Amino acid sequence: MIRLSPAGRKALLTLHLVTSLGWLGADLVLLTLGVAGLRGADPQVVYPAAGLLVTWLFAPLSVLVWVVGLASALLTPWGLLRWRWVLVKFAITTAMLGLVLLALSPTVRRLGELGPDLTTRDRLDLVIPPAVSSTLLIITTVLSTYKPWGRLRPAAPASRRPADGSRRAELEVSRTAGRRG
Ligand code: HEM
């Protein structure tokens, strides 16, 4: 299995933090635009701006966050299927990626086209989804720092562990995870 050098791992973690927390930031900007639209701000400004934000930043970041998050799991001793907090984060991010690409992006484009004919129901489409997704991303961030719920499966017995430095990496994970699970 490919494992990163300490410098490579730091670089990947930095990329993971910049992309995922940038994603949360972009989501909060979308929510701000949605609330402004609901409160009567000019729809000809708010919804085209939201369309640009989703098309050029939020949707591409969703894909990048998913890929870099997956790499952060698979290329480090955390793994994807070893710790509950990692798997739950992956599930949340995957669900969000699908919703952003299949539901939010077309909806925001439609809102941009409707212009002044928007109803309150339409305007809520740019308030409720970003409010839910920002909350999910804040929960994801908390899961990342507290790393709750321990392991999914017990660690392999010492005799079955490969002698290629993985043991050192496992110890590193246990230390970081505060020996949970
Ligand atoms: C595909 C989805 C994701 C996976 C599989 C994933 C996995 C991981 C893994 C394995 C680490 C530890 C990396 C290391 O120690 O080198 C990590 C760190 C972190 N992740 Fe994610 N992540 C995902 C998405 C997210 C998202 C969406 C956010 C926030 C919005 C996030 C926030 C963080 C933070 C803040 C850390 C640093 C925690 C620390 O160093 O204590 N992750 N992630």
Image (tube, helix red, strand yellow):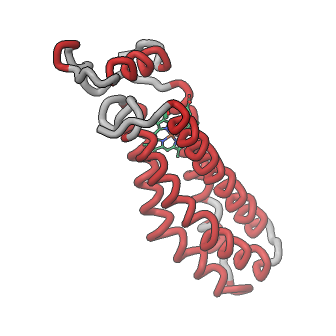
Tell me which residue sits at (61%, 57%) in the image: 130
Location of residue 50 (image quadrant): bottom right
When the figure is inspected, residue 42 is found, relative to residue 170, above or below; the finding is: below
Locate residue 47 relative to residue 99 in the image: left or right: right
Q: Which is more toward the observer, 99 or 114?
A: 99
Left or right position of 89 against 17 = left
Q: Nearer the viewer, residue 147 or 79?
A: 79
* Residue 151 image point, x, y percent: 33, 23
Name the image quarter holding residue 16. Answer: top right
Residue 117 falls left or right of residue 7: right
Q: What percent of the width, then of the height, locates residue 105? A: 54, 72
Instruction: Single out the residue that lies furthest toward the right.
Output: 41
Image coordinates for residue 140, horizontal then vertical, percent: 52, 39
- The reply to whether residue 135 is visible in this rendering is no
**Of 143 and 21, the residue lying toward us:** 21
At x 17% / y 19%, what residue is drawn? 160
Residue at coordinates 64% horizontally, 47% vertically from top-left? Answer: 18
Q: Image check: 125 left or right of 167?
A: right
Q: Position of residue 129 (x, y in %)?
A: 56, 59
Q: Residue at x 39, y 15 (%)?
A: 171
In which quadrant will I find the C terminus?
top left
Q: Nearer the viewer, residue 73 or 152?
A: 73
* Observer able to see residue 44: yes
* Residue 31 position by quadrant: bottom right
Where, quadrant-wise, is the N terminus in this rendering? top left
